[in-house]
Image: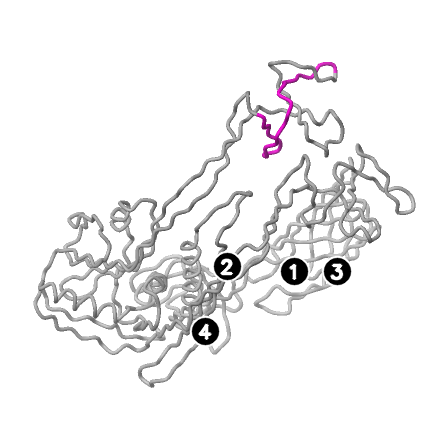
Amino acid sequence: MVKKAIFLILLLPILSFQTVIIKSDYNFNIKKELFESNNLVVIEIFSVEKEITLKKVINYIKDEKGHYITYNGNYYYTNDKKRYNLQDDKFVVDKNGIYVYATNFPWARDEHQKYIISDFYRKEIINKKEEKYYVSGYLTEIDSFYIKSFTPFVFKVKKFDEVEKKLLNLKKNKNNFYSDKYDVVVNFSNTQNKLKAFIMEKLQQDKRYNIYDRDYIREILKDVAIKDLFGEISFDFRVPKYIINIKTINFQKRITKKDLVDFFPNEMSGRCLISGEKVELGRYYKEGDDNSYILDKKEGNYVKILNFPWRKERFKLASNFYDLFFVKNVEYINYHLSILLNIIDTKNAKIIFAKTFKASVNIPQTFYSKRLVIRNEKIEKINNLFKDISKAINKKLKEVFYLSSVVKDVKGLTVFLYDGENIGIKKGQVFRIFNNHLTQGYIRIKEVGQNNSNGNIFRSIEPIRKYSLAMESFYYPSNLSFSITFEYNDIPMVGAKINFLDLYGSENYSILFGFSPQVYYIGISKRIYSFDFSVKLFLKETEYYISPEISITSFKRKSKFLPIGSGISLGINLLSKKLIFGYESSF
C-alpha cells in the first residue's frame, strides 16, 4: 500500500435502538415498520418538486373512414378513399384491395409510385397531462456506535405514494471502514441541498473514501438527542487528512429569445433539404452536356435549389425531403452554474488542488416536439445539469485521490496486488504497473478481495515484476487503432483499416476497406513482424474476384503507448503477380 489514510470515526454511546426518524416538511405516508433494520434509520427529505407536463400527443388509429395513409413510417393525408389492386400492370378499384392512392405525392417518379400498400387511419390529438415528483435527501443508518450506511438520493416518481416504495428499495451505500482509505470530509458552502445530494451520491458510490458531509452528520445527531431517544449524545470526529470544499460561486438564470428551426421528414411533398435549402417541388433533373441539367422526372437524381434567385442556378443530388418548421422568438431560460472545488491538506493547512467547474443549460419556456407544444420540463433539465457537474467533480477527485498498490505476484498474464476493498479497488479499474518511473504494462482488475485483488494484463511493455508499483490509470492504451491507406495496383485506391492490437500493442489482424471510382474491396489481413498477409474481395459492378496478397512494410510506431505511426509497403498479388505500392498512416 503506497498511500495510507485515517478514517473519521463517530463515537456514539453503545446503545441498541430500532426506530425510524423522518425529517421532512412534506406529508409522507411512510410506514416505518417496513424498514427492515435493527438500527436507527434517519431519512431527511431535502426537496419534493412537482412538475406538470402538458403535451399534445398525436395517435393514428386504423379506421377505414380515416383520411391518413402510412408510407415509410410516416403518415400522410389523402383525399382518395378508394382501395385498389394491381391487374395487368394497371391499378383498378377493388374494395378489398391492398393499395391506396396518395393524392399529394409530387415526388413520385411516376403515377405508378403514387399507389402504395397501406391501411386507412384517422388522426387523433390528445391533450395529455403528466405529473412527476422529484425527491432528494439523505438516508442514514446508525448502529450502536457508528454510521453504518450513508445514502444520498435523488429520484423521480410518477405518483406521490410511490415515494415509500422507492425509499425501501434504495441501494444503501454501506460504510465499510478501512484505515487504508482516504480520510476526507466534505464541506459545502452556498450550495443547494439537492445539488449536495447529487454530489454526495456520486462520491459515495466510489469506495476509495471514508467520506461524509460533516455538517449534516452533526445536525442528524443533534436531532436524535432532541427526540430524547438517548438523552445527551457525546461524539468526536477524528481530524481528517483532507478537506474537500465545494462552493457554489453562482447559479444564475437569464432569459433569452431565439428562433427555433426544425425539419420533419416528408418524402411525398417536402420542399426542403436537410441543409435548409428550398427546392423546386416535384421536379428531378439529370446531368446533360456542358454542365447543363435536363428535366427528367423518371431517371434524374438532381433537384433545383430555389434559395437566392439572384445567384446562378444550382442543382444538388436528391436526398431526403423535409418540411421546415419555424417558430420566431422562442423564449429560453439559461441556467449557468459555477462551482469552486478546492482540497486542503489538514496536516500542512495548504490547498493542494483547486478547480472551477462550469455548466449551463438552455430550457425553452415552451418547446416543440414533432410540431406539437410541450410545456414544463424544467426540473428534469436542471437535475441533469446538477448530475453532469457532479460527474465532472467526481471524475476530477478520482484523479487527485488515485489508488495505488504494490504487485504481490505475477502468474502468466494475471497480476496480483496487495490491496483490494481496503483501499476501494473495484472490478474493471485499470492500473499502470511501473518501476523506477518506467511503465511495465497495464492491467484491468478482474477480482477483488478484502485485502487483495488481481487483474489481467492487456498491454505489456516490459516484464512485470513483483514489488513493482501499481497506480490507477485513467488514460491508457486502446486495443484498437485505425489506419488510412493509399495503394496503387493499376489504379490508385484509398482505403481504411480497423486494427486489432495484440498484447504488445502491435497489429494482430485488421479488417480492410478500400475503393476507387471503378471498384471497391473488403478484406482481412494478418501482420507477422514486417510482413502483411491479406485476402481481399474486390467488387466491380456485377463482377467480383478474390485477391490474396503479401507485402513487406516499413510501418513503425512513434510510441510504445500509442498506435500512431506510418510506413510504406511493397507487395504482390499472388494470382496476377502484379506489384502493389502502398502507404499507411495510423492514429
Q: Nearer the viewer, mark 2 or mark 4?
A: 2
From the viewer's perspective, is residue 255 above or below residue 83? below
- The residue indicated by pointer 1 is 529
Q: Earlier in the sequence, mark 2 or mark 4?
A: 4
Q: For the residue marked with disc 2, what is the amino acid?
A: Asn
Mark 4 or mark 3: whose residue is earlier in sequence: 4
Q: Are marks 1 and 2 in contact (CB under 8 Å)?
A: no
Label 2, on which residue? 362
Secondary structure at numbered mark 2: strand
Q: Which quadrant would residue 113 be assigned to in this image?
A: top right
Disc tally is 4
Please indicate whether residue 104 sits to the left or right of residue 315 in the image: left
Q: Is residue 223 visible?
A: yes
Q: How far apart in space, not on screen, are marks 2 and 4 (Cα)?
A: 20 Å
Q: Nearer the viewer, residue 184 or 480?
A: 184
Q: Residue at x 67, y 58 (%)?
A: 483
Residue named by callout 3: 583
* Extent of the magenta region: 67-88
Q: Is residue 268 left or right of residue 231?
A: right
The answer to whether 238 is drawn above or below residue 61 in the figure is: below
Marks 4 and 3 close (CB-CB < 8 Å): no
Tag 1–tag 4 contact (CB < 8 Å) = no
Vertical side of 184 occupied by 573: above or below: above
Whichever of callouts 3 and 2 sits on the residue coming sooner in the sequence is 2
Three-letter amino acid code of the residue under disc 4: Thr
In the rendered image, the quadrant that contains the C terminus is bottom right
Type of amino acid at the residue the image marks with label 3: Tyr
Residue occupied by mark 4: 356
**In this picture, residue 54 sits left or right of residue 369:** left
Furthest-right residue in this view:
290
In front: label 3 or label 2: 2
| Disc nearest the viewer among 3 and 1 | 3
